[in-house]
Image (spheres, rainbow, N blue to C red):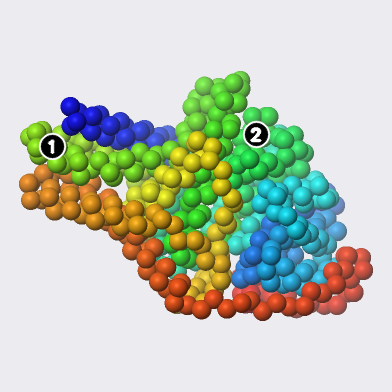
Amino acid sequence: MLFEVILVTYCLALCVLSVFSLNRYVLISLFRRNAHRRREEAPPLPDDQLPFVTIQLPIYNEFYVAERIIRSACEVDYPLHRFEVQILDDSTDETLALTRRIACEQQARGVNVVHLHREERTGYKSGALAHGLVKARGEFVAVFDADFVIPRDFLRRTVPHFSSKDVGVVQARWTYLNEGYSVLTRATALGLDGQFIVEQPARCWGDLFLTFNGTAGILRASCIHDAGGWQHDTITEDLDLSYRAQLKGWRIKYLWNLTCDSELPADIHGLKAQQFRWTKGTQETARKLLPALWRSPTPFWDKLQGTAHLLSNSVYPFLLLVGLLNPLMVFAAHRYELRVLWPLSAYFLFSLFGTFSYYAQAERTAHPDWVRRVFCFPLFLGASIGLSVNNAQAALEGLFGKKSPFIRTPKYHIIQRGESWKEKRYRSPVRWTTVAELALGLYTLAALVYAIWVREYGATPFLILFGAGYLLIAGYSIRHHMIGSRGPQPALVAEPEPLLLTATEAAPTPVRSVPRGHVRL
């Protein structure tokens, strides 16, 4: 009876995983069917027809990257009298003095820069965006996180797409400044490529629900207001607003060929914090909006795909359950002489091929060296399994409504190999999951030895993959914790706070422009 319970639970978990994996084929099909739309452009608008745009830069203790994003915002190719830059700086450290100084410099150049600081971080990022929106002058609002670099032609290439009155959001594709920094960043980039190269365009071109990703996008101000504004009852305010806007009839347009560089987490604890926030916030949004989605007059197919989209992170508890049951399946199968492991392995590998095809399609489409990149897939898959402990907790907390603060992902302005974050500030907290990952890795390794000893070879693909994944993430966590604890974390040097002038009061003192992507603090 115990074996039957284990087998049924195991098969149920595998079934859930395979459903989400097989749905990748749907997205691949939509992407391939509409591949001709990858180079879609809108006719440019003459300067006298360009609308006023507000560029919002939410910042919180981002000393290492704040200057880079502010300067890139102030250097966009757009008439000076038709845009403003809002620096929404909630910082509590030396970043605040830095952003004020840069604001003054840019005002002196004639750029319309507004510096806003809140003493209370109510609502975190969404609260900052809402606070800035009240004071924004723009008909459109472009939002960029601190770790991004804004392309000079971003506004000229996105604004024309709002010629259709039902377009509420235009989203650009993410690319990565430090993708080649380490094995960890390469695996992270592969995972994000699937979403930004295949899934987002497939959903857009297939008229399915998709998301504004919280940065590297531009929104119609009236769309934000009509959807109910920025709300902070979830920690993924971008996904929440996206679905509320689409349920109101607004469309999100995804520009595959417009890319914005960003910085990936350089250490595993930063990656865990980012993954935890994204996973939990997506589940919170699903809990909040799935009833409204199914009550809406949206076609059934769109509701189904929207549900799959919102609940995609629900796979992590099932992935963790599979990892826990793998060794028990080996013992039970051998004890009762049941040959079920090979069929289960074959089914799992078949469904897994959908996920592999999804990422292979992304790499082949966007990168000439896609074959080399695809070799990172086992590493990415193992890392996903290892992160399932961290992400399963996030998924369950989000689904059952447990609240937690917005924990940002620290960025260090690290681009090239050899650069180190050891002496930088802003460490992400070390989570208890490291102990669980190490324990699961050793538990699975012991099961692998047992499976080989009793000749249950059908289980070995599972056990190797899961054991390697747990030990990979546990090893990275321990190593990065040791590196961070050895390195000194000096206090940042505060600068005197300058008097912040308005754009009309600032003297026209020329300020030397810093080359894009080469800012050093």
Can the viewer see residue 109?
no
> Residue at left 37%, top 66%?
478
Left or right placement of residue 330 versus residue 144 in this view: left
The image position of residue 359, as x and y in percent, is 40, 48
Quadrant, the N terminus: top left
Residue occupied by mark 2: 244
**Distance between mark 1 and mark 2 Cα atoms:** 48 Å
Taking the view exactly as shown, the residue that stands out farthest to the right is 505
In front of the other: 160 or 25: 25
Graded by Cα atoms within 10 Å as few (under 14), some (14 to 19) or many (20 or more), the crowding at tag 2 reads many
Left or right placement of residue 381 versus residue 49 in this view: left
Residue occupied by mark 1: 333
Say which quarter of the image contains residue 328. top left
Q: In this view, does 471 lie above or below 130?
A: below
Q: Nearer the viewer, mark 1 or mark 2?
A: 1
> Residue at left 56%, top 43%?
403
Left or right placement of residue 223 versus residue 319 in this view: right
Q: What element carries label 2?
A: helix
Q: Is mark 1 on a helix, strand or loop?
A: helix
Say which quarter of the image contains residue 88. bottom right
Q: Is residue 423 above or below residue 326?
A: below
In front of the other: 477 or 353: 477
Name the amino acid, label 2: Arg
The image position of residue 83, as x and y in percent, is 80, 56
Quadrant, the C terminus: bottom right
The image position of residue 293, as x and y in percent, is 58, 27
